[in-house]
Image: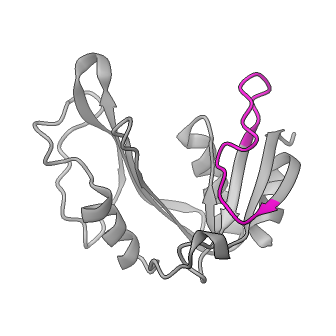
Amino acid sequence: MELEESIQETYIVGKREVLNHHQPSRYFNLEERNRTFCIHQECNHDWVQLEYGLENLYEFDELIRQLTFTKNSKAIIGYKQTTSGEARFAFFQAGQIKRSIVQKYISHQREYRTMENFGNRLPFENKILNSTSMKPMDGVEELLDFYDEIQPWIGKLGFTFNGRKEEENEFIHLEIINYKN
């Protein structure tokens, strides 16, 4: 798989297992700082999904930026963490980050903030983001919702959810040990 080969150009990969179920923390080891990348096509047969456990946004953004540049392709990141309140939407094309929104809950201040609002608004965006990393949200109207905003935006960029049941998939699990020098 091309994506797996590209990952191996950037990272030292240890174990590789193909399973019929998803285990996002399969190789996680806090002391050794090992992580897991899981590659699959569960949600769409025409797109490849990469699930990861990276320590910072910059690391993953740089990986995706490089992949979309070398493959002259598109990538979309979209999620909403229910436990932390963090939301992320990002669109990459041909090595460029076209749009990136990161929202986080600042627990010690008990408020949400838009930590990143980069790039030009996409034509279908329906939220006005007034908060910044220094200015909290006024209420929750600015909060991105996975089902009301993120998932429809992903669809408007060409990704549709037409997958198959988890047990009908192959999930490639890669143990990420470190960067290659």
Left/right placement of residue 34 relative to residue 161 reads right
Residue that protrudes farthest toward the top in the picture? 108
Kindly indicate the quadrant of the structure image that contains residue 157.
bottom left
x, y (%) of residue 134?
Answer: 26, 27
Residue in the picture at 72% in, 44% down: 26
Kindly indicate the quadrant of the structure image that contains residue 94.
bottom right
From the image, which quarter does the C terminus lie in?
A: top right
Q: Is residue 116 above or below residue 42?
A: above
Residue in the picture at 78% in, 44% down: 176
x, y (%) of residue 99?
Answer: 40, 59
From the image, which quarter does the N terminus lie in?
A: bottom right
In the rendered structure, does residue 142 fall within the stretch colored magenta? no
Kindly indicate the quadrant of the structure image that contains residue 139.
top left
Residue in the picture at 34% in, 62% down: 150
Q: Is residue 20 above or below residue 46?
A: above
Residue in the picture at 66% in, 76% down: 168
- Is residue 75 visible to us here? yes
180 vs 87, nearest the viewer: 87
Secondary structure mostly taken by the magenta-highlighted segment of the chain: loop
Q: Magenta part of the protein: which range?
A: 18-35
Left/right placement of residue 163 relative to residue 116 reads right
In the rendered structure, does residue 22 fall within the stretch colored magenta? yes
Left/right placement of residue 77 relative to residue 59 reads left
x, y (%) of residue 130?
Answer: 17, 43
Colouring: one colour
- Is residue 121 visible to us here? no
Q: Is residue 127 above or below residue 86?
A: below
Q: Is residue 75 above or below residue 57?
A: below
